[in-house]
Amino acid sequence: MSSHTRIYPYQRQTGNTITATGLSIDLLFLMAVFFLSRATLLAELYPFGSSIIIAIGSRRQRILWPVVLAVMLSTWFTNPNSVYSRLLVFLILGLAYTFYPSWRQRSSLIQATLVPMAIILIRGIDLTLGQPSFYSWVEIVFESIMSWGLSLAFLEVSDSKRQEERLLGSGLFFLGVLLGLQGFKIAGFSLQGLVSRYILLLASLTGGPGIGAAVGTALGFIPSLSQMATPSLAGLMAFSGLIAGSLKSLGKPGVIGGYLLSHLVLANYFLGPNNVLLVLKESVIVVLSLLITPPSLTNYLSEFLSQTTKQQLETTDSSKQEKLSEVLKSLARHLKYSGYNESPQTVIRQVARIVCNGCPAAKVCWQLEGEQMLTTLQELLNSSQGKLTSNDIPEWLSSRCTRCRELLAALTTQANKFKVQSVEDGLNSWLANTFEILGSMVTQESSRVEQNKDNRKKPSLKVSVGIAAVPRHQADITGDAFSIAPIAPDKHLLVLGDGMGVGRKAANESGTAIEMLQDLLDAGFSPEFALRTVNMILLLRSSQESYTTLDIALLNCFTGTAYFYKLGACPSFIHRNGSINILRSHSLPVGILEDLQLEPLREELQDGDLLVMVSDGILEAHRDINEKEKWLAKALQRVGEARPQEIADRLLKQASALVSGKPLDDMTVVVARVEKVG
Amino acid sequence: MQIFFSMEGKQLWARIKGELDLENADTFRQELEANLDHARPEVLVLDLTGVTFIDSSGLGVILGRYRRLKKEGGKLIIYRPQPQVRRLLELSGLGKIMTIMNENGEQIGEGFNNGWSAIRN
C-alpha cells in the first residue's frame, strides 16, 4: 500500500515525421554545436564538446550522432593537442548512449560523471603511452572537471524546475558558442565582436540597465577566457550595457544612443587608438541589425525577462503558503488523533491488510486514490465510537467496494481496540479545529481575494437600528454590551451580550466576547468556529467561573437570510405585518464550559420586518411568569411605523415603568428594521 | 441565603433557601466547594425548593460545580426549582446539560421549545 501515487496520462505517438522548420532548427543547432566544440578556455582546454554529447545523448537521442559528428569535425579542424584521443572520447560517449539507452534514466549527476571518467581513462592512457608530464595531467583533470560541470548545467536545462538553473545552462551554451566564434571574420570584422555587441544591445533594450550591465560584463570577459589577455573589454561592455539600458524607456533610439555615446567616450581609453575605428565600424553594423530586428522578438524577450521575476515571486509565495498550510493541517491531525495508542495510519493499514488483501479493486483504491482512501477511513475511524453503519461510508466508496461489511467490521474492531478514550478535551479539539481551519484558509486566501472582486454588486437590503440601555438601579455602568456592524460586503451582524454579574466586570466580559466575535467573523471564520473560539478564550483567560450570554443575528443583506445564535440569551421578537414571532433557542452561554452546543435558527427576513433583541432585565421586569414575553409582544404590536430608535426608547420606558424606575438588572433593547435599498 | 447539607448514600444534598444573587454568590460557592471537598460525593443534588430568585451570578456558581463534577466523573441534579427559577435555568441552557427533577423524582423536560412561536392579532 502506498500513499504516493503517480498517474501517467496516455500520450499518442506522433511518429517521426520531420518538418522543414524542424530540420532547419536542427541544422542551426548543429552549426551552434560546431562552434561550441571549438570553444577553448585558456587556449588549451576544450570542455564543451563532450558535455554537449552527454546532454544530447540523454535528452535528444534522435540527433545524437549528427551532434557527435559535428563535434568530431569541429575538433578535427581546430586541431588541438591529442586530437585522436579526444575524438575517441566523443565516439565512446556516443556509443555509450546508443548501446546503453537505460543510462538516460539515471540522475543528471550520474550521467554527467560519465564525462570525466571517459576523459581521464582514454586521454590518461594516451598520455601514459605517449609522453607523460605533470602539466598534461593537470590539464586533463581540469578539463574533466569543467566538462562535468558543463554537462550537469546542460542536462538541467530541460529538466530543472528552477528558472535560474535553466537560464544558467542556456547562458553557458551561448557563451560557449560565442567563444567558438573566436577567430572567424567577415569582411575584416570579428564575428564574435559583432554577435556579442548585438546581444548586448538586445539585453539592454529588453532588460534595462541591470541586465545590460550584467550581460556586458559577461560578454566582455569572453576574449580573456580563450586567450591570455587582460579583460579590458569587460569594463567598456559593462558601461555600455548600463548606459544603453538606462535609456530603455526611449526605445531603440535611446538604447542605440546610449551605446554609441559610451563607446565614443571610453573606447579610446579601454581599447587603444588603433582599435577604436574598427570597433565603431562594428558598432554601426550592430546598430543597423538592431534597427531591423522585429519588435515581436524584443517584446518576447522583454516579457520573458519580466515573467521570470514575477514567476519566482509567485512561486515563492504560493509554496510558502502551501508549506504553512501543510504544517497547520499536520498539527491538527496529530491533535485530533491524540486519543490513539498507535497512529491512525498504522490502524488503517491494518484494516486494509485484513479487508483489501486479494480484492481486485485494491489497486485502484490504494495506489491510484490512496490519499483519499486514507483520509476517508481515518475520518470514519475517528467518528466511529464503535457504532459504524453502512450509511457512514461515502457513496463513492460504497458503490465500488464489494467488501463494505467486512470493512465496517474491521474498522469497528480496530476502533474499539485502539481507542483509549474519546477526545473529550475541549481545548484539544478546539485547537485541532483551529489549526485545520487556518490551514484551509491559508490556501484559500488568494481565491477569496479573487471572489471578493466579483462580489461588488450592491446589497438589496439594509438595516436601520435603534438602541436603548439603562444600568440596574444604583449602578453607573451596564454589564450589557452590543455591536451592530457590517461583516464582509454582504452580511450585517447584530449582537447583544450580557456578562455575568453587574457593573464594569460584567461589561468587560461581554465587551471582550463581542469584540473577539466581530473580529473573527470579519476575518472570514464561520460563526460556529468564531463562537467556539470566543468560548475557549474566555474559559482559558479566567480561572474564576464567569460567562457571557450572546444573542446574535447575522443577516445576509443580498438574500435576506438571517441566522440566529442564542447562547444563554433571551428570546427575540420579529414583528411582521402585525404579527409577532418569538424566536427561542436555549444554548449555554460562552466562557464557562468547554463543550458548546450550537443550535442556529434560520429565518428569511423581508422588507419591513422589525427585529427586537433584549437582555434578560427587560423580560424579567414583569413579575408574572406568564407575562414575561407577552408584555413585550403586546407592546410591539402597538409600535406601528415608528423609527427603530423611538421603538427602543419606548420599550425601555415601559420596562422601567414595570419596575417602578428601579431595575433589578441591566436593561438593553436593540431594535432593527430591515428595509429595501433605494 | 441559607444552605443545609446532608449526605444520603453517595449523594450530597444541598437544600438552599433565599435568593441566589451577586451578593451571596461567593458564600454559595465556598460552602459548596468545602462540602464537595469533604464528602467527595458521586452526585450533588441542589434542592432549590426554597430559592425565590436566581441571577447570572447564581447560575455561574451552579455551572462551575457542574464542570467540576463532570471532570471528576460525578453528576449534578437540580431538584424542584420554582417556576421562575426553572425558567431562568432553561433559558440559560442549563436544562440541556443537567437533570432537573420534580418532587416525585421525575425528570422535568424542557418547558420551552426551541424555534418559533407566533402571537397573532
Image (cartoon, coloured by chain):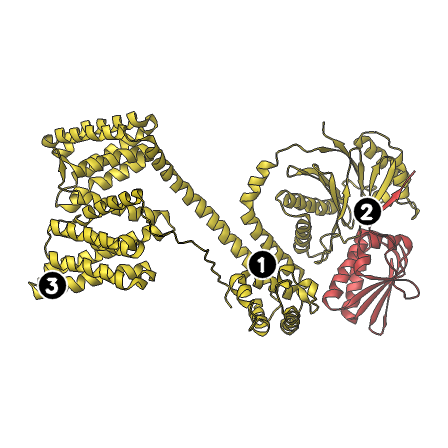
Q: Secondary structure at mark 3?
A: helix
Q: Which chain is yellow?
A: A
Q: Is residue B53 visible?
A: no
Q: Badge 3 is on which residue? A: A126
Q: Is residue A158 visible?
A: yes
- Are dots 2 and 1 on a single chain? yes
Which x, y percent locates residue B13? 85, 67
Q: Badge 2 is on which residue? A: A570
Frontmost of labels 2 and 1 is 1
As displayed, is residue A198 above or below residue B89?
above
Q: Which chain is red?
A: B
Residue type at tag 3: Asp
Q: Secondary structure at mark 2?
A: loop
Q: Badge 1 is on which residue? A: A332
Q: Are marks 2 and 1 in contact (CB under 8 Å)?
A: no
Residue at point 91%, 56% (across, down):
B82
- Are dots 3 and 1 on a single chain? yes
Q: Chain of mark 3?
A: A
